[in-house]
Image (cartoon, rainbow, N blue to C red):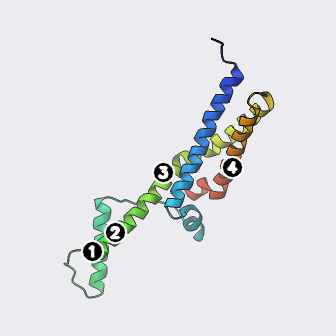
Amino acid sequence: MAKPRAIDVSFWLCAALTAIVVNTCVQIEYHNWRAGNYLQVEMRQEPGITWRTAATGERAKSVFIERRRLARGATGDDLEAPPSVEELDAFETWRQRALRENRLYWWVSTFGVFQYLLAPLALIWAAFLVLKSRKHRIPSIVFAILALACIVIMFYRQYFQSLGW
């Protein structure tokens, strides 16, 4: 069996890195879409806004219901009445939105931050392969285009700036 050449190994490593970069970009775009385009809508409405994750468990439910109960008391309604169906539906709607925003936050704060290192590395590596390997030139051009697209999206969505760090 023939020993793999270093340029072939380099090509496959670049392919794997590009796949990680593209997967991260697609995941963030998907979760951003599921969260109602949170990165471009919420983060740009108020300068200096800080992105925080929301608690979504039983404690969050009890706080939500307590706030609704106090609001009912302010309007003169019965304070001791159990939560209405509308209040429980409002909580569930809020919770689902918070879960989507939390998932987006997780992707942006972990892999999204690594994009600032990995995407340029994938672009430079692919450009190197375009110049050095005739055999892998076309796929390397595709890798470079994909990495460049991910870099553009990364800066457009402002992954790092959206975290408010």
Q: Is residue 139 visible?
A: yes
- Work out how far the residue at label 2 is from the one at label 1, CA to CA, in angstroms: 10 Å
On the image, the x and y values in percent for residue 161 come to 60, 57
The amino acid sitting under disc 2 is Phe
Which dot, 2 or 1, sits closer to the camera?
1
Q: Tell me which residue sits at (60%, 34%) in the image.
A: 16
Do tag 1 and tag 3 residues touch (Cβ < 8 Å)?
no
Do tag 2 and tag 4 residues touch (Cβ < 8 Å)?
no
Q: Which mark is residue 60?
A: none
Q: Which residue is mark 4?
A: 149
What residue occupies the far bottom of the structure in this picture? 76
Q: Which residue is mark 2?
A: 91
Indicate whether 1 appears above or below 90.
Answer: above
- Label 1: state its secondary structure: helix
- Work out how far the residue at label 2 is from the one at label 4, CA to CA, in angstroms: 38 Å
Q: Tell me which residue sits at (46%, 54%) in the image.
A: 103
On the image, the x and y values in percent for residue 148 come to 71, 46
Q: Earlier in the sequence, mark 2 or mark 4?
A: 2
Quarter of the figure that contains the C terminus: bottom right
Residue 148 or residue 155, whichever sits in front: 148
- Residue 57: quadrant of the picture: bottom left
* Number of other residues with Cα within 10 Å of mark 1, as a class: few under 14, some 14 to 19, many 20 or more: few
* Number of other residues with Cα within 10 Å of mark 2, as a class: few under 14, some 14 to 19, many 20 or more: some
Do tag 3 and tag 2 residues touch (Cβ < 8 Å)?
no
Q: Is residue 51 visible?
A: no
- Label 3: state its secondary structure: helix
* Number of other residues with Cα within 10 Å of mark 4, as a class: few under 14, some 14 to 19, many 20 or more: some
Do tag 4 and tag 1 residues touch (Cβ < 8 Å)?
no
The amino acid sitting under disc 1 is Val
- Work out how far the residue at label 1 is from the one at label 3, CA to CA, in angstroms: 31 Å
- Label 4: state its secondary structure: helix
